[in-house]
Amino acid sequence: MRVDRDKCNKCGLCLKVCPGLGVDFENLNKDIFGKDKNKRYDSNLGYFINCYLGYSKDKKLRFQCSSGGAVTSILIYLLKYKIIDGALVTTMDSREPLIAKSFIAYNEKDVIKAKGSKYTPVALNECLAEIIKSKNKKFAVVGLPCHIHGIRKFQQINPILKRKIIVCLGLMCGQGVNISGTRFILKQLKVKASEVKNIQYRGEGWPGYIKAIKKNGQIKITPYLEAFKTFTLGFFTPERCFLCTDLTNELADISFGDSWIPKLMKNNNGVNFIITRTQVGQELINKVKKDICYRPASPNLVIESKKIRLFFKKDSHQLLAIIARVLGFGTSGNNIKSRITPLSVFVIFTYLNSVLSNKYPDFFLKIPLFIWKLPLLTYRKSLNIYKKMIIKP
Ligand SMILES: Cc1cc2nc3c(=O)[nH]c(=O)nc-3n(C[C@H](O)[C@H](O)[C@H](O)COP(=O)(O)OP(=O)(O)OC[C@H]3O[C@@H](n4cnc5c(N)ncnc54)[C@H](O)[C@@H]3O)c2cc1C
């Protein structure tokens, strides 16, 4: 963690709420789900009420958003019916196009402007002061698991934040990508960073495309899955992501993800996995029937479709925590027992890729693209073998 010593007033708040320093799930679960009577528990999914498959009824949104446009549609609904005054969302900074910038959207136009997943670091906390200082306003927050962990920790010690953030919409997250990841994508697209006006990581159908719009109007595009293979091997992934045990955003009111189900992957219409966790979240989903089409899904379907990532996040946690400690990184403070299988070799390999590419980003960015093809060529085949291994351990 880097501290801006000119701004720091040594209050210690950052250390108290930082998710990177540890997340006490037991304590937070009690706080968030303690009173809900309808809750169910699964060690992979956390506490939840129901699971659904769904998507926005607005065809344009469904096509332009990441998975099915459910998050954007719900935010529009919340603003339209004045359930919230503003939504904490994230867009790419128009002045620094490779940097993501969170802001509070107070109208539909700005919510739509912020649609789509940003695979780059996001400092959501920068907008919390605006929420705390606002007068008699209510907010929704959209964030990754680490963001929601930090907000829930902050809400525990700040009743104003607890009162003002009335709903947390959580994105599922297998792994983050650092800023060098965006530079690597630009390298693949043969676009210089200085030429970029705007970058979109998802959209144009499902799973969608990464699009770099140049200042001269030229557009360069590559399938999202093609560009993402390198990151799935751990390259340009922040090391801390390997110590995170939360794939499905277990502390959110509602979680949203991609539905990687072979049957649904045949066409390019996105479908969200939606998990309601709290009464607030369930009531909201019940209300948005006019805007979102959804049907129940079994929790097992969610788990099956996310087996590989769950193996990283849950089954490999203890093993990764030991390696992190040996390498001098902290741990997440969680204690989930590891399941050692041949896939663990792959997990360690990707973790080491992450550590090395974070330490020497310039070296990795200089490697010619044809050399990257070597590990990527074997990627698909090995992934299929690994899939079989964990489905039949
Ligand atoms: C880094 C990252 C990793 C992910 N990994 C997985 C995964 O492994 N498995 C899976 O099923 N789903 C994953 N997702 C979630 C998935 O990509 C979609 O975001 C989610 O399904 C919601 O889709 P949607 O169409 O409803 O969202 P949209 O309607 O497109 O809205 C997305 C909302 O999220 C906000 N947002 C976008 N990026 C960020 C960010 N980085 N931080 C905070 N807020 C943001 C936007 O401002 C917008 O409000 C990931 C998302 C991200 C950003």
Image (tube, grey):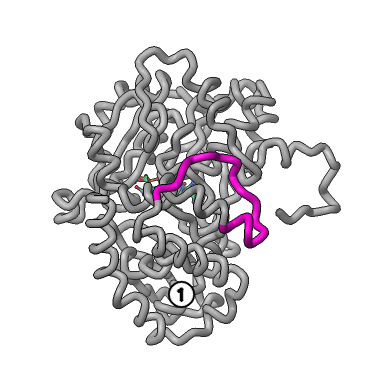
Q: Residues within 10 Å of mark 1 (few under 14, many from 20)?
A: many
User: Looking at mark 1, is its residue's CB closer than 8 Å to ligand 1?
Assistant: no
347 or 392: nearer the viewer:
392
Q: Looking at the picture, how far across and down is residue 220, in whole percent?
A: 37, 74
How would you classify the magenta stretch by its main secondary structure? loop
97 or 108: nearer the viewer:
97
Image point (44%, 51%), residue name:
316
Residue 54 lies, with reference to residue 200, above or below; the image says above
Can I make out residue 383 in this image?
yes
Q: In which quarter of the image is residue 210?
A: bottom left
Q: What stretch is highlighted in magenta?
A: 323-339
Q: Quadrant of residue 204?
A: bottom left
Residue 31 lies, with reference to residue 249, above or below; the image says above
Q: In which quarter of the image is residue 266?
A: bottom left
Image point (37%, 33%), residue name:
74
Can I make out residue 93 in this image?
no
**In the image, 29: left or right of 218?**
right
Q: Mark 1 points at which residue?
A: 186
Image point (23%, 39%), residue name:
301
**In the image, 390: left or right of 103?**
left
Q: Looking at the picture, how far across and down is residue 248, in whole percent?
A: 40, 40
Residue 261 lies, with reference to residue 293, above or below; the image says below
Q: Looking at the picture, how far across and down is residue 334, in whole percent?
A: 55, 40
Q: What residue type is labelled 1?
A: Leu
130 or 225: nearer the viewer:
225
Question: What secondary structure is marked by label 1?
Answer: helix
Residue 337 within the magenta-colored segment of the rendering: yes
Residue 336 lies, with reference to residue 358, above or below; the image says above
Q: Looking at the picture, how far across and down is residue 382, in whole percent?
A: 28, 68
Quadrant assignment for the N terminus:
bottom right
